[in-house]
Image (cartoon, rainbow, N blue to C red):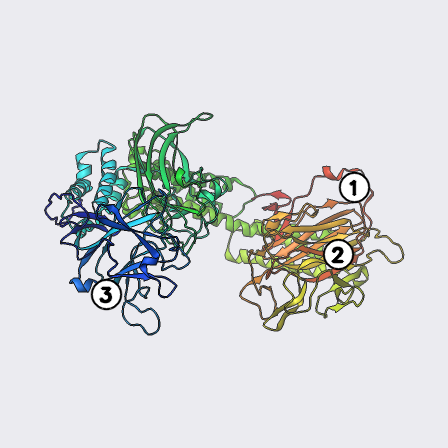
């Protein structure tokens, strides 16, 4: 449908030029474009200071004491004023009340020059009210008693407080006072001036606001760039509304109002976007988010070297989080540093590389940049000088050689207003190209240590290639092909499953689905590119929108709805049904593995467990010969539960006589300080743990070990040790009484950790010998997901549960009374040292399941201490420890063959057994289901 503009335009007229504020003159101000409609109502050539008031912290200071008058400063017979050396925080202001002159719109004009080319019009001082050249409207009061608008009052509306560059030649500056339906007075102030600045010829004249032709020209430049980049058909330009939009903007002239222009500009983005979507390809669309466009804010951008597909310059810095902005901050550097944090000759910018075909392309991006002034203040958008220029570019990448510049555009960057860069190019060869933007500091400003900031926004890269179809259409075709391929893959999977002799149930049902879907997928596979793309409709298609369906005529959804969905569902049901049957084998494997563990050599329940295993095998045989029914599935589930219960009972049949408790500490007892060493220890039922760095005080800092945690005068969770910086050590003798040897016994160590990931910090435990050498241990950083080199137990961090990094005042261990909303989950560790086999392994249990490591072989060194250890010294951070128990368990002799292999084998060459996990009643081998030792999934 053709898009039309419903606009009315005023007639155009030509405007003559003249001196500032002459009747009929057109002037630009920071607020827009205005026409002077009468003679000035206020003029001051500073031959006298009538109407001016001195600004000074010293009472009684006169204007003459602050300024010198130069008789022929501006021109013969026209004086100017110049600040003396004491005027850093002093100045003058003129109070202007529009009501006195009938209200309405006014333009303020003044002339300035400087002996210094890089002097700013505005220099911040410690008093935010003292800013050189400020036009500010006030309604409030200054002080408790004064009524009405006064200098420095409340409810300020700043009309002019922009940074400018001063020239050595006289320059006229303008600011507009536009009514806002609030009765306020305005103050034109010149404060904080340096001695090389001169001011002359202040005028205030009535005016009317007209269309800002700079906005018109910028819009026309962008629209014509896209219009002229390619030989579009007449219907494309007409039906999209582009021709009418350009025509309407062209008619905006000198006497058009800002409302006329705003009405057109409000419609322009939608019309342009519609044209681009219908006729060009978006090469920044990654289908994931809007990061490539720099038009939306995403949190947690801090020193991030990449955003979307863009790489940030300079190297080592990155995009910065700056929530107050509506565009991306490439790095803001505070006062004290020259441009770009001390690299004033280097750019700040972004770039990315793309493989492009022949065609017509348009790259555009907006930017602004500034130096920060000596006092940072509020990081307002308009801080700083105008020190920077930007280069937007497209180059052809030549591997191993300098790039070929296809096109570049250079413009000055404003500190407050975004500058648009628009690059139209026609590429004549398929190659890799780089698009990018770089902001540089001008040479004159590279020595100023004021800090700097650069922003980018509204990146776009649209193209029209020589392909018959656009990228969005080709992506649609790819999505359709992907659906068809998914259907074919699922058919292959189904056929494989039907032929697999490990599956017994519902093969006929799955085969029926295969026969039905195969015909549909085969027909879709024969469709041509034209057949597929003719079903595309950009108004409807959204790959991520799962609510779309075939009724909208989109083939991508039809393929899924009529074919792919059915075979996916059939495969899932088939696998789930057979998983139920196969899960009994997983439970049998787990029970047999438990029965074979040497740690249960002395168990008295072996016969009972073997009987339970045989019963489960009988159920398994019966079910393989049957068909799937809910009743049969329930029979399998019940058999698995019975077998798992038998395993649990079996583990409890190790007689007490076969176990000797070496250490048993639950940390419920109070900490006691040794009078000699001044160290604290906590005793358990057997043994005690002594701490190198412990406190019983509520305010002694969180770097210490503690028993529980102090909060608001209360000691919470006393039965847990809050881990601090240092060690907690338990010394013990595990050897068989009177022999000094472990024989073929097993040492079993159990403990609980409640872990939190802390930046740069490790926590863990070690079993050490009499010489403090590590026998076994695990020491890890849960923030960086790294394991310390001192660890020799191959525990995988991914198998543990732990809280995120950060500072938390009262993170509680899981299960603690009066727990907070932030609870650290429990991880139970079990370490087995088998002195008969001279092997060791570890098992961890958490919400993620139970995981056992492969066996590690060691030389049989006997540990004599358990050391809880960390290097945490962060305030208000938490890791908890509990339930340390060490037991010696009797185990029989190993066979001569096992002994011989163990003694002659190189431990490094031993092929480790796969890591097994018992989770939800299943054994998982290296992350996959195992049946009879064979990985099946």
In the displayed structure image, the side of residue 628 where residue 424 appears, left or right: left
Q: Residue tagged by mark 1? A: 902
Dots 2 and 3: beta carbons under 8 Å? no
Residue 432, position in %: x, y? 40, 30
Give the quadrant of the N terminus.
Answer: top left
| Residue drawn at (27%, 50%) of the image | 80
Q: Residues within 10 Å of mark 2 (few under 14, many from 20)?
A: many
Q: Secondary structure at mark 3?
A: loop
Cα separation between marks 3 and 1: 93 Å
Task: Check whether the beta carbons of the residues at disc 3 and disc 1 lie within 8 A of each other.
Answer: no
Image mark for residue 182: 3
Q: In the shown orientation, is residue 618 left or right of residue 426?
A: right
Q: Is residue 518 visible?
A: no
Which numbered mark, 3 or 1, is in the foreground of this view?
3
**According to the image, label 2 marks what residue?**
866
Distance (Cα) linking label 2 and label 3: 77 Å
Residue 323 percent coordinates (x, y): 41, 54
Asked whether 327 or 356 is in front, the reply is 327
Query: Relative to the observer, which residue lies in front, 569 or 329?
Result: 329
């Amino acid at each position: 449908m053709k898009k039309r503009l419903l606009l009315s335009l005023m007639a155009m007229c030509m405007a003559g030029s003249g001196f500032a504020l002459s009747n009929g003159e057109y002037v630009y101000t920071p607020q827009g474009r205005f026409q002077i409609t009468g003679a000035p109502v206020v003029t001051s050539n500073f031959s006298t200071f009538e109407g001016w008031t001195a600004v000074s912290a010293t009472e009684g200071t006169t204007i003459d004491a602050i300024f010198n008058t130069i008789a022929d400063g501006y021109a013969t017979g026209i004086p100017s004023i110049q600040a003396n050396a004491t005027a850093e925080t002093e100045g003058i202001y003129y109070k202007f009340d529009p009501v006195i002159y009938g209200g309405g719109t006014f333009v303020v004009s003044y002339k300035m020059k400087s002996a210094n080319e890089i002097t700013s019009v505005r220099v911040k001082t410690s008093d935010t009210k003292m800013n050189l050249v400020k036009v500010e409207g006030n309604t409030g009061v200054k002080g408790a008693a004064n009524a009405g608008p006064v200098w420095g009052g409340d409810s300020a509306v700043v009309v002019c407080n922009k940074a400018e560059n001063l020239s050595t030649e006289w320059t006229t500056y303008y600011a507009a006072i536009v009514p806002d339906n609030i009765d306020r007075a305005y103050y034109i102030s010149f404060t904080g001036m340096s001695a090389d600045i001169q001011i002359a010829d202040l005028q205030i004249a009535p005016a009317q606001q007209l269309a800002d032709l700079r906005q018109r020209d910028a819009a026309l430049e962008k629209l014509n760039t896209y219009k002229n980049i390619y030989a579009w058909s007449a219907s494309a330009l007409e039906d999209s509304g582009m021709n009418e939009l350009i025509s309407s903007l062209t008619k905006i002239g000198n006497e058009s109002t800002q409302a006329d222009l705003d009405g057109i500009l409000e419609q322009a983005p939608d019309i342009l976007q519609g044209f681009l979507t219908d006729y060009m390809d978006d090469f920044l669309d990654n289908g994931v988010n809007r990061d490539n466009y720099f038009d939306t804010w995403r949190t947690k951008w801090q020193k991030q070297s990449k955003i979307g597909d863009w790489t940030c310059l300079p190297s080592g810095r990155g995009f910065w989080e700056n929530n107050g902005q509506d565009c991306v901050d490439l790095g803001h550097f505070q006062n004290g540093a020259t441009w770009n944090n001390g690299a004033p000759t280097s750019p700040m910018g972004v770039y990315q590389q793309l493989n492009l075909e022949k065609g017509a392309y348009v790259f555009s991006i907006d930017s602004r940049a500034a130096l920060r002034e000596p006092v940072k203040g509020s990081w307002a958008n308009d801080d700083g000088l105008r020190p920077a220029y930007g280069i937007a570019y497209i180059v052809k990448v030549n591997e191993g050689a300098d790039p070929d510049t296809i096109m570049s555009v250079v413009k000055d960057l404003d500190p407050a207003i975004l500058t648009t860069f628009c690059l139209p190019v026609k590429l004549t060869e398929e190659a890799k190209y780089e698009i990018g933007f770089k902001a540089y500091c001008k040479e004159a400003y590279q020595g100023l240590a004021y800090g700097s900031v650069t922003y980018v926004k509204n990146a776009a890269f649209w193209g029209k290639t020589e392909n018959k179809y656009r990228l969005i259409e080709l992506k649609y075709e790819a999505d359709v092909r992907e659906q068809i391929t998914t259907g074919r893959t699922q058919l292959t999977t189904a056929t494989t499953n039907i032929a697999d002799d490990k599956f017994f149930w519902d093969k006929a049902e799955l085969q029926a689905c295969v026969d039905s879907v195969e015909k549909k997928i085969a027909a879709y596979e024969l469709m041509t590119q034209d057949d597929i793309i003719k079903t595309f409709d950009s108004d409807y298609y959204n790959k991520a929108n799962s609510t779309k369906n075939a009724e909208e005529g989109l083939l991508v959804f039809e393929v899924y709805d009529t074919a792919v969905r059915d075979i996916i569902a059939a495969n899932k049901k088939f696998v789930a049904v057979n998983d139920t049957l196969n899960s009994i084998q997983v439970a049998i494997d787990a029970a047999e593995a438990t029965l074979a563990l040497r740690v249960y050599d002395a168990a008295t329940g072996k016969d009972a467990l073997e009987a339970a295993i045989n019963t489960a095998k009988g159920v398994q045989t019966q079910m393989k010969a049957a068909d799937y029914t809910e009743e049969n599935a329930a029979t399998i589930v019940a058999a698995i539960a019975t077998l798992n219960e038998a395993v649990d009972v079996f583990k409890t049949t190790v007689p007490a006589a076969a176990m000797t408790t070496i250490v048993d500490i639950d940390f419920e007892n109070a900490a006691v300080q040794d009078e000699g060493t001044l160290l604290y220890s906590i005793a358990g039922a057997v043994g005690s743990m002594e701490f190198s760095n412990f406190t019983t005080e509520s305010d002694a800092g969180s770097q210490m070990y503690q028993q529980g945690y102090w909060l608001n005068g209360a000691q919470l969770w006393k039965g847990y040790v809050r881990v601090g910086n240092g060690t907690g050590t338990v010394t013990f003798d595990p050897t068989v009484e009177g022999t000094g040897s472990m024989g073929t016994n097993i040492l079993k160590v159990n403990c609980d950790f409640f872990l939190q990931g802390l930046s740069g910090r490790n926590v863990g435990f070690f079993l050490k010998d009499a010489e403090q050498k590590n026998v076994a241990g695990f020491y890890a950083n849960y923030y960086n997901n790294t394991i310390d080199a001192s660890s020799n137990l191959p525990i995988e961090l991914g198998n543990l549960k732990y809280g995120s990094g950060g500072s938390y005042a009262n993170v509680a261990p899981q299960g603690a009374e009066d727990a907070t909303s932030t609870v650290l989950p429990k991880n139970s560790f079990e370490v087995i040292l088998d002195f008969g086999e001279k092997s060791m392994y570890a098992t961890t249990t958490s919400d993620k399941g139970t995981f056992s490591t492969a066996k590690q072989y060691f030389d049989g060194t006997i540990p004599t201490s358990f050391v809880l250890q960390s290097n945490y010294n962060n305030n208000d951070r938490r890791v908890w420890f509990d339930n340390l128990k060490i037991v010696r368990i009797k185990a029989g002799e190993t066979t001569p063959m096992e002994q011989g292999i163990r003694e002659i084998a190189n431990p490094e060459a031993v092929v480790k057994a796969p890591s097994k996990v018992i989770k939800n009643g299943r054994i998982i081998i290296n992350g996959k289901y195992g049946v009879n030792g064979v990985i099946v999934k």
